Amino acid sequence: MTNTREIEKDFIAKRDSYFEDNYIKKTKGNYLRRYRNNLIRNEAEQLKNVQKVLDVGCGPAILYPEVYERCDEYHALDLVQSNLDKILSENDSRKITVIQSDLDSFKPKEELYDLVICSGSIEYTENPEKVVDALIKVLKPGGTLIMSFPNKKSPYRIWSESVYKSFNRFRNKLKNKEVRSYKRKLLSEKAIREVLERNTENANPSIKYFGLKLLLQPLDAIFRSLDYTILKYFNEHPSKLLHKLSQEFLVVYSRK
């Protein structure tokens, strides 16, 4: 799969800088990633009896240190082996099990985990709904699944995936400049709810939209400070009228 090859190349190239650039440094450009990370950490903090955890698409670092400290077993799954090697080299490997796999091929045993976190990964799979279904099945009864998705109704996401990405690729080709990019599938709340309902009657997940952008690419980069101000404002003051046009939504689901 093209996405798999491109993602591997990308992460191998930026393995040593990825975590610091996207989560440690506090910049206007990485604000949304840090905001999403904090949302997930806050949701996980409220859970009790989290003994066995699966971090899906973990990248080269432990993104949820509080969860890692509380649990007995932390399973880190990633497509890129060098990401997993870096995690093992920088953490107590007695608690960590690494799993090298792409999500479309991942076939775990059922009812293993108290908590599964999947953020910024499902959208790069061949069949996101099928992956969500598989992640539900690995939860123990009473277990929790926390997932983030790029929003199919977001004007920013639609423009980015349907128009700007192709334009940017063409522009870079004219400049003989190699820039890695890979296809991202956009998901709807309705589609995710349908998967959850197939597994649990009256699933009733918690869903939170965030990251409302009014400036499309490349204006968001040109006017970075204004873009950041707008993003931050709507995250702190959600609009009842516009919130479902946000870039992303977070789903928290508990298996009964």
Image: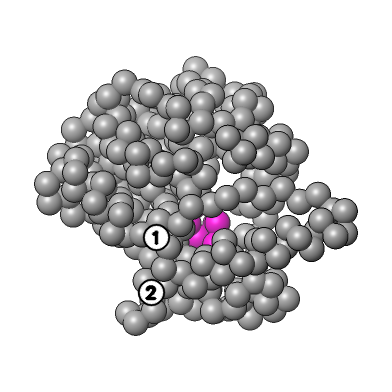
Report the quarter where the N terminus lies: top right
Whether residue 28 is in magenta: the answer is no
Q: Dot 2: within a 10 Å radius of its alpha carbon, few (fewer than 14), some, or many (20 or more) residues?
A: many
Q: Residue lying farthest top?
A: 94
Q: Which residue is mark 2?
A: 243
* Quarter-of-image position of residue 222: bottom right
Q: Amino acid at mark 2?
A: His
Report the quarter where the C terminus lies: top left
Which element carries disc 2, helix, strand or loop?
Answer: helix
Q: Is residue 177 above or below residue 48?
A: below
The stretch in magenta equals 31-38
Q: Amino acid at mark 1?
A: Phe
* Mark 2 and mark 1 residues within 8 Å of each other at the beta carbon: no
Label the magenta part by its dominant secondary structure: helix
Q: Is residue 183 above or below residue 208?
A: above
Provide residue 33's location: percent of width, then percent of height: 55, 56
Q: Earlier in the sequence, mark 2 or mark 1?
A: 2
* Quarter-of-image position of residue 172: bottom right
24 horizontally vs 135: left or right: right
In the image, what residue occupies the spot 38% across and 65% down? Answer: 209
In the image, what residue occupies the spot 65% across and 61% down? Answer: 165
Which one is nearer the viewer's eye here, 67 or 154?
154
79 horizontally vs 132: left or right: right
Q: Residue lying farthest right?
A: 175
* Quarter-of-image position of residue 74: top left
Q: Which residue is mark 1?
A: 249
Which element carries disc 1, helix, strand or loop?
Answer: strand
